[in-house]
């Protein structure tokens, strides 16, 4: 919550700084801000729904929680991602533990979480490729090195995540645990066998994996729609294709702030850089970045409060 307060103060300071050179436009910016934040939040709801659904369909029918429960868990992860260091990993681990507390077998919960992270990274790679395609269509003088670097990094991450789930890698990990268990008996490698069995069973259902991947791609596309709506409301309309380019490039750069709470500062710079790539001036892009940050603070802080109540209830 301290992170939320600090980020909110930074948002306010940044908004005043952006508009300081154009004092006459400050009232207009402030007037459009509530509606822009509302539009950002409305566009973000389908993103939570898509990611919750993508995880839900991976689970066997007899082990699935309700959609309402999964939406709440994904909301908690949104709060962690927005306000905690390495929030996506921390949040994913936390909601996986809550699923186990709710009665789901630990190997199944961990298996679907692991595959979910892989599909999310793969979905971002597909979205980045789509952004590159639109960039090449929209710009004759396109400089694609940033996109290619992002695609290469995302592809490498996906390859490592998939390789880590294969029997060979898990077998190596099991041997390490066997050695460690000789000194620390509580480190039992048997749990890894159950985890591997759950992973291989989930990997075998290619249809569900494909649908989950499409949902993750749709989630990234909704981020572009959010950007398009916000820029339109603050007086600088762009096309969906341009928004796809901006969002894809911004998300590539945002990954550099992985360890910071909500990629503080990095995200704002990434969005501005993405806009400059398509010729959008700094002022509207900075305002759009601050709108998104405001939405993240509002959604994230309420999610952390609800998460805490859930933990106390358990």
Image (tube, rainbow, N blue to C red):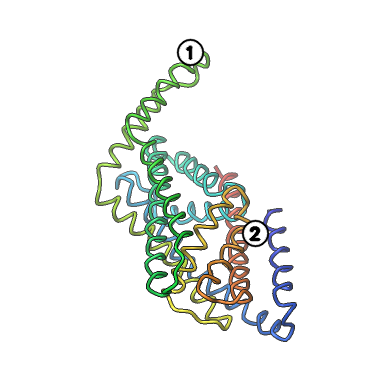
Say few, some or many: other residues with alpha carbon within 10 Å of mark 2 (under 14 / 14 to 19 / 20 or more): some
Query: Foreground: 166 or 125?
Result: 125
Gap between marks 2 and 1 measured at Cα: 46 Å
Identify residue for label 1. Answer: 182
Q: Secondary structure at mark 2?
A: loop
As displayed, is residue 252 above or below residue 234? above
As displayed, is residue 304 above or below residue 297? above
Horizontal and vertical percent position of residue 55: 38, 51
Say few, some or many: other residues with alpha carbon within 10 Å of mark 1 (under 14 / 14 to 19 / 20 or more): few
Q: Are marks 2 and 1 in contact (CB under 8 Å)?
A: no
Of the image marks 2 and 1, the number of the one nearer the N terminus: 1
Q: Which mark is residue 141?
A: none
Identify residue for label 2. Answer: 265
Q: Please identify the quadrant where the C terminus is shown.
A: top right
- The residue drawn where x is 39% and y is 28% is 192
As displayed, is residue 278 above or below residue 89? below
**Residue farthest toward the front in the current orientation of the protein:** 141
Which quadrant of the view contains residue 193?
top left
Horizontal and vertical percent position of residue 6: 72, 58
Is residue 210 toward the left or the right of residue 186 in the image?
Answer: left
Is residue 122 toward the left or the right of residue 2 in the image?
Answer: left
- The residue drawn where x is 38% and y is 63% is 218
- The residue drawn where x is 73% and y is 72% is 17
């Amino acid at each position: 919550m301290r992170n939320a307060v600090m980020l909110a103060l930074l948002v306010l300071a940044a908004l005043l700084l952006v508009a300081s050179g154009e004092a006459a436009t400050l009232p207009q910016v402030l007037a459009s801000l509530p509606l822009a934040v509302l539009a950002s939040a409305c566009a973000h709801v389908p993103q939570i729904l898509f990611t919750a659904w993508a995880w839900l369909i991976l689970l066997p029918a007899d082990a699935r929680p309700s959609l309402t429960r999964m939406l709440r868990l994904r909301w908690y992860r949104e709060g962690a991602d927005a306000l905690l260091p390495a929030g996506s990993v921390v949040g994913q681990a936390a909601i996986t533990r809550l699923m186990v507390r709710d009665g789901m077998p630990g190997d199944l919960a961990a298996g679907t979480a692991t595959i979910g992270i892989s599909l999310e990274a793969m979905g971002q790679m597909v979205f980045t490729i789509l952004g590159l395609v639109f960039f090449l269509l929209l710009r004759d003088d396109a400089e694609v090195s940033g996109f290619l670097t992002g695609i290469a990094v995302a592809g490498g991450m996906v390859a490592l995540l998939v390789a880590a789930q294969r029997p060979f890698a898990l077998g190596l990990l099991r041997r390490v645990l066997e050695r460690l268990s000789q000194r620390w008996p509580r480190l039992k490698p048997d749990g890894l066998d159950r985890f591997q069995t759950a992973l291989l069973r989930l990997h075998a259902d290619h249809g569900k994996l494909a649908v989950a991947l499409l949902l993750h791609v749709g989630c990234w596309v909704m981020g572009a729609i959010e950007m398009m709506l916000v820029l339109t409301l603050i007086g600088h309309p762009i096309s969906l294709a341009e928004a796809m380019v901006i969002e894809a490039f911004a998300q590539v750069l945002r990954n550099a702030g992985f360890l910071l709470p909500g990629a503080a500062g990095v995200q704002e710079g990434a969005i501005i850089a993405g806009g400059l790539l398509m010729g959008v001036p700094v002022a509207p892009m900075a305002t759009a970045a601050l709108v998104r940050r405001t939405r993240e603070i509002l959604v994230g802080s309420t999610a952390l409060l609800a998460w805490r109540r859930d933990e106390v209830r358990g």
